[in-house]
Amino acid sequence: MRGETTTYTDTFPKLLLLNAAQRGERPAVREKDLGIWQTWTWEQVLDEVRAFALGLKELGLVRDDKIAIVGNNRPRLYWSMCAAQSLGAVPVPVYQDSVADEMAYVLAHVGAKIAVVENQEQVDKLLSISERLPDLAYIIYDETRGLRDYDHTRLKSFADVQKIGRALDPRSSAIEWQDSISKGKGADLCVILYTSGTTGRPKGVMLTYDNTIKSSRNANAYDKLDENEEVIAYLPMAWVGDHIFSYAQSYCAGYCVNCPESPETIIEDRREIGTTYAFAPPRIYENLLTLTMVRMEDASAMKRKAFHYFMGVARRWGEKILNKERVPPHARFLYGIGNILVYAPLKNRYGLSRVRVAYTAGEAIGPEIFRFYRALGINLKQLYGQTEASVYVTAQPDGEIFADSVGKPNYEVEVKIDDKGEVLYRSPGVFAGYYKDPDKTAETKTPDGWVRSGDAGFIDPKNGHLKIIDRAKDVGRLKDGTLFAPKYIENKLKFYPNIREAVALGDNRDFVCVMLNIDPVAVGSWAERNNVVYGSYQELAAHPKVYDMLASHVEEVNRSLSEEGPMAGAQIRRFLILHKELDADDGELTRTMKVRRGFIAERYAQLAAGLFDGAKEVNASTEVTFEDGRKGAISGRVKIRDVKVYPSATVQVPMGKAA
Amino acid sequence: MRAPSVAEIAAGDVLLAVEGVSLAFGGVKAVSDVSFDIRKGEIRAIIGPNGAGKTSMLNVINGFYHPQAGRITFKGKTRRAMRPHAAAAGGIARTFQNVALFKSMTTLDNIMAGRSLKMHKSFFWQIFRHGPALSEEIEHRKTAEEIIDFLEIEHIRRIPVGKLPYGLQKRVELGRALAMEPDLLLLDEPMAGMNLEEKEDMSRYILSMNNYYGTTIALIEHDMGVVMDLSDRVVVLDYGRKIADGTPDEVKKNKAVIDAYLGVAH
């Protein structure tokens, strides 16, 4: 087998055979179960996948069928993808927390024949929408609890399906399976990933084996990843990041993927594993930092002083030491002491002690948050990627890290900026098209293979790095023509641990206003320390002292905007704190937790009107959806505050064509 | 261990029966002449307004109170009163209206404490945590971990329970009771003070416990919606007397029950 490497590695099932032959004894997957890490080697994974694939075949799964995967990151769900691919079927991972209605749309649109789901919760969800899914023949579940008394005509457990596969004649079935695998080729459809979509219905991005495998190989080469890496799989399986990172790159490099015990235990689990390669949206790093800051406020005075002193040292020198620049010996000495007392214990807490490369992607990260981790000596880098590109477009090379750039194009990726400022890219990872939607495909992908990213950005002439300002369609102008980049402002606000979400409004208006969500953890802890009594989120959000605190944050943001030439005109004049938390179930956030600005402006139209017409207080009533799908309403009076605006500190510089 | 169907319960073995039980504290009659039974595998609810004698009834069942009159038959053996230790050894576990956990011990240790009646190796081995005691402990740890998995409390395994929010403490208490692998589980207001979501979770655990472990459950609860959805049969107490006994539907229509709950014009 080894001599034929080249012909064996253009699909994931072939890569599985190769890994089982070359590194059969090495760990491929771990899962924490009943408090103990269970390990499967590549050889064992091959055996599990084969049994399941043969079972699926007996259930009638054939080439080009679609198979939905729903659940948290579990080894069996990853195996289901490979098993389906070995038969030429196409896996479609679906966001496990989507409500029944969203799931029905995706499953009906793709025409899934079989669904492999994690547990009773997902089975119930699928059964509740089964009449809308005429194509769905079987539901297969991993976790058996609570499902024993269900009608099992269309329901099967994962183990039962494997049993069907194992009951077949081992010789002839294995040969047939090998045949089926060798029929697969690189140009075949490998996976369909539905993008959560900031507007409209989700779109199914079709990726081929060539797309994902070439993109993964390039990424592995770019960061020199090999079979010794340890990663933890905890992001939604339906997100392209997890698909590439926990599945595609693992199969290409042969590294081990660790599945946490439950979504709540990730930090603990990561600490036990000591991941070497990490990938997370900024939200995760923000949460860790917020938690750290909150806990430090509660720590003893001695510890708090040590923490702040050494964080000061780290901010001054840490970044330089990480970039291997020259620093004076006393700085190195102080940093060494700080490492023993503060940085190493913190990194250990985060489970990032052994990390070689950590990426943040999905959204811009607050520069202060970014610098915090770099200062600790964690090689956190930024990456720019899209589902349509099999993730990788640009990434920051080691030693070339800037808080406001997303790096240089990855291997085999070309990037260009069109005259309106939109970023376009072309690479082997570029998708085949949107499933059943040639119109959208034509809108996004040019005939010569360039993809419109929908993001506005420019390439910094100083260092060749790409910088993203905002979504191309979101970059607007105030009535007087001043440039208004909402996300840029929102990200500045969200750097403050007290602010969970921010929504900036200003396109085609006279000035800029923001709606804020406070962070219940950070502000709650502050309230406890300052004897502020509250009964609910709404009450806390409306507290005058909370308003005072946020007003000072907004003013600081204005001051920093005033120093940034073209942004100085878009300072925040007025703000309010929303009376409810923005929630994906209400459609206010996407499933990846990005704010849907337009939708929010419409939903809170009364509040938006109040912001711009100078009202001091507005009555608002908002419909909310509970987790079980029932609806209710939250109403209340929302106060609006004016904020100080700073004069532009620097000379106005024209933005040029970059904007 | 399959849970019996409704028909099987109707015809099934009686696990515990109380007959003509009366309990008084001085002149106060807490329970007077109450009789009912609990069948194997069912979820049996005891409801009634405040002060109706529900908790007293549970205390009689697990031997904490000794009634002045009446008989209790548990697993075919009839006696005048239960003794708490005999009740626990015989397979009756309970949770309390006000959580009663070891606050400074971790979730895991609390659940392991529920296993102590099942540990049989000699004290000699246990103090050294060696040989047979160690392998026994590993066995028990496995059961404890299964319960932790069942109740989805992995993330608080190592946290002292005193630091946990109330809803989670309730869950840990349920875990400790479950660790005894009881034949009869008594739940005293398992959902008191919980929000809607926590109540739904708790209901799911109670149903799966009944379904998965086949545990017979007797519960006291105030939330009528929960009681009617969960239980197979309901007994209603008012001022220490039994005023109704039957399926949730029968009880809902019973005149005496409606009067007791909604009040009656005098």
Image (tube, rainbow, N blue to C red):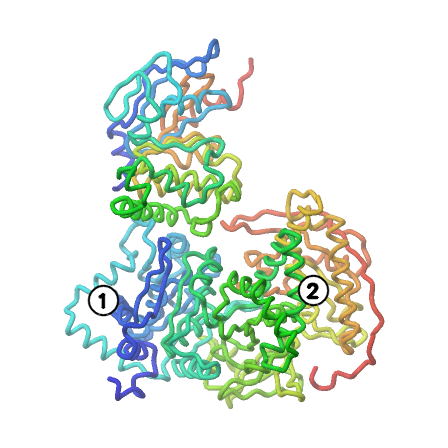
The residue carrying mark 1 is A58
Q: Residue furthest bottom?
A: A448
Q: What element carries label 1?
A: helix
Q: Looking at the rendered structure, which numbered label has been put on residue A529?
A: none
Q: Are marks 1 and 2 on the same chain?
A: yes
- Quarter of the picture holding the N terminus of chain B: top left
x then y, percent, for residue A175: 18, 77
Q: Mark 2 lies on which chain?
A: A
Relative to A13, does residue A138 appear above or below in the rendering?
A: above
Label 1 environment density (alpha carbons within 10 Å; few <14, some 14–19, many ≥20) = some
Q: Looking at the rendered structure, which numbered label has been put on residue A493?
A: 2
The quadrant where residue A216 appears: bottom left
Q: Tell me if B7 is positioned left or right of A120 in this view.
A: left
x then y, percent, for residue A280: 52, 68
Q: Residue at x 30, y 22 (%)?
A: B17
Residue type, label 2 = Leu
